[in-house]
Image: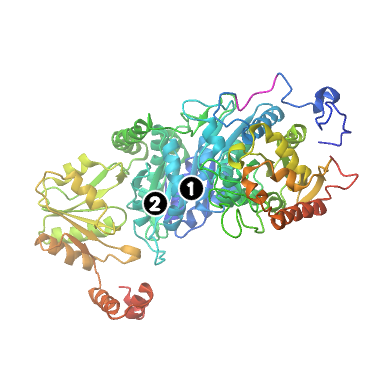
Amino acid sequence: MPFQPVKFYQTGTFTVGNRLLEPEVRSVQANMQRTNSLNSGHRACQGCGEALGARYAIDAAMNASNRQLIAANATGCLEVFSTPYPETSWQIPWLHSLFGNTAAVATGIAAAMRAKGRRDVRVIAQGGDGGTTDIGFGCLSGMFERNDDVLYICYDNEAYMNTGVQRSSATPPAARTATTMPVGPEPGNVFGQGKNLPQIAMAHNIPYVATATVADLHDLEYKVKKAIGIRGAKYIHIYVPCPLGWGAASHDTIKLARLVKESGLFPVYEAEHGVVTSVSRIRKRVPVEDYLRLQRRFAHLFGKVPAVATIARIQAMADQNIRKFGLLEEGTHS
Amino acid sequence: MSLKQCEGSRAVAEAVALCRPEVICAYPISPQTHIVEALGEMVKSGELQPCEFINVESEFAAMSVAIGASAAGARAYTATASQGLLFMVEAVYNAAGLGLPIVMTVANRAIGAPINIWNDHSDSMSQRDCGWIQLFAETNQEALDLHIQAFRLGEELSLPVMVCMDGFILTHAYERVDMPTQEQVDAFLPPFVPRQVLDPDEPVSIGAMVGPEAFTEVRYLAHAKQMQALELIPQQAAEFRKIFARDSGGLVRPYRCEDAETIVVALGSVLGTIKDVVDEMRAEGHRIGVLGVVSFRPFPLAAVRDALQAARRVVVLEKSLAVGIGGIVSTDVRMALSGLPLPTRTVIAGLGGRAITKASLHKLLRQAQQDELEQLTFLDLDGKLIERHLLREKQMRRSGPLAENILRDVGVVAARIA
């Protein structure tokens, strides 16, 4: 969202209260007319970041598209917890086909809408990090390359949670998963080069790429709204903590999403046609340790003998993001 | 109607265009390419509209785009072959499970390894249980006609339809075809009215999870729909005849089966060669006929039984191999004949483009008439090559890559093509 001077609404938080904002930038969630597109009664875990992110994003998209929205959904937690037949939490036309083809299915829906002259209908594809960065990557890249009129939203909880917390290419170094156990000389996930999907999306020169977290509702809604208003391929990567997979407290979902940004581990920014146009500045920098300590998946770093070197490597990753994106610089947009 | 001389792929492309598809997605694989190239040109020139032509990045994406388009209420078409069909398998099953009436041409081609671009039926046969209707074309005219019938059949039943035509033999052959007019096709094929559609005004969730409490029923209904197709296919062929004034499609097509002692069962373009041989053998006094199977899925058990039961022996000649047991089509034919004292022989022929010659067929069918055929025969199998290779494997552990060894033994390849 455009720069907004912070007005403290509650002591000690960065929450910008709706009543202090202009009506047009007030959150969709705060509106009585919100669509509850992912309705209550679904089977997500308590504190599920993905359910929260999807609800925020799809309600915002419904608002921005004048309720003319169709979504394709990858296999995964979001699909399973929302639609065990005959129940469905979706209040929008919604299609689940497969795990790895969601971007292509959305392309097909968008093509059908074009053929039928329904320019008003907007199309979303959504999936978790596995469905996006691994198995669905080919179809996603194809959709980007053709610049199909689809908004792809990745809810990144950094592992295959639906199948029981296995490593994906979005799993961070040192993290414990069922397939990267905290054993041996280098416990947890390996330190690789990573697979930075927002940057890869930007390399396709698509009209719009953004990252967001569930800790900043206004920013997330603003980005979804902006993306819905753009023709062509759009990609939004939303960071969504997973209490179950990460071994985190359900009540820490928002806190973790805030800390990952404030530490610099997850840069929050926007890019248009391959160029970063705004970054969300770190307001109060924290060491990565503050973020890592809240999660059992990193517990092996904080044993009797703390893994100082490993923690330092993770801190170095955060520092590199801070330098690369100018996350501490004055004058950048919030 | 207009008679024209054109390539099989062109004929199919024009027929598909006459069906007013709204979304076509394509990924190139030989020998399907000419079909989608022609359609791509028609869309780009504006000749075919409104229609979206999407160049996708894989066959998996091609079928997935078709799924999205069909679920959004658009008439969707794609074409593939061989490895491409295998690459999209997950989405092929998904389209059937979701009940989306996509029409797909399979330009039949062998499956590797060893990689081979030539014709046989291994690709389509690998998908016989995926829930799609599978129709096999004998000629370019029939390939053209079956596409028009496929859209109507699929949309009537909410099932996807695969039109199988022999790669190269049909797709690349120039033949005279009778191209229908737009008015004829419009009279036969009504606009697509989906049973389920992604519509913002009436939101539904499509493709959600079904547990053990209802999965069997859902699968049963898939089978029941194919059983309905057994009735619909002949009805539609009859209606097709009224409008287009020719016989195309249907479940099976008997040829000179009356009083036949031996009946050869086959699918696709090889039927033409077999008919020629049958004509020649009939002229010599042999009582022999042919049964062409047009609809392989659903498999017309009753029609096949009716057509074959008066014979004394059945020879199933098929361009596919179920490794480890033998025939695929012949297994289904035996099912149709169960309880009848009717010996059924399997002949595997034409794998990977091996020419099925009249000379070989004459020899084979004369053996069949004398009841000299084995249960399983590989037509024109080079036994010496096999023996040499088996000996090589016996003699040394590191005997090397099989395909290369065989080719080295064959010698100059061009000299082998009869």
Report which residue position mark 1 lands on.
Answer: B78
Residue beneath the point at 75% across and 53% down: A315
Residue depicted at 68% across the width and 35% down the height: A253
Q: Secondary structure at mark 1?
A: strand
Which region is colored magenta?
Answer: A33-39
Write down the chain letter for disc 2.
B
Q: Which residue is mark 2?
A: B177
Task: Tell me residue B164's x, y (percent).
Answer: 37, 50
Q: Check disc 1 and give the amino acid type.
A: Thr
Q: Earlier in the sequence, mark 2 or mark 1?
A: 1
Q: Which one is nearer the viewer's eye here, B302 or A59?
A: A59
Q: Which residue is rendered at x = 40% and y = 48% of the image?
A: B144
Judging depth in this view, the residue of B182 and A32 nearest the camera is A32
Horizontal side, residue B292 vs residue B310: left or right: right
Image quadrant holding the N terminus of chain A, namely top right
Q: Is residue A150 visible?
A: no
Q: CA distance from mark 2 to mark 1?
A: 22 Å
Kind of residue sitting beneath label 2: Val
Residue A155, given in percent of the width and then of the height, sits at 64, 40
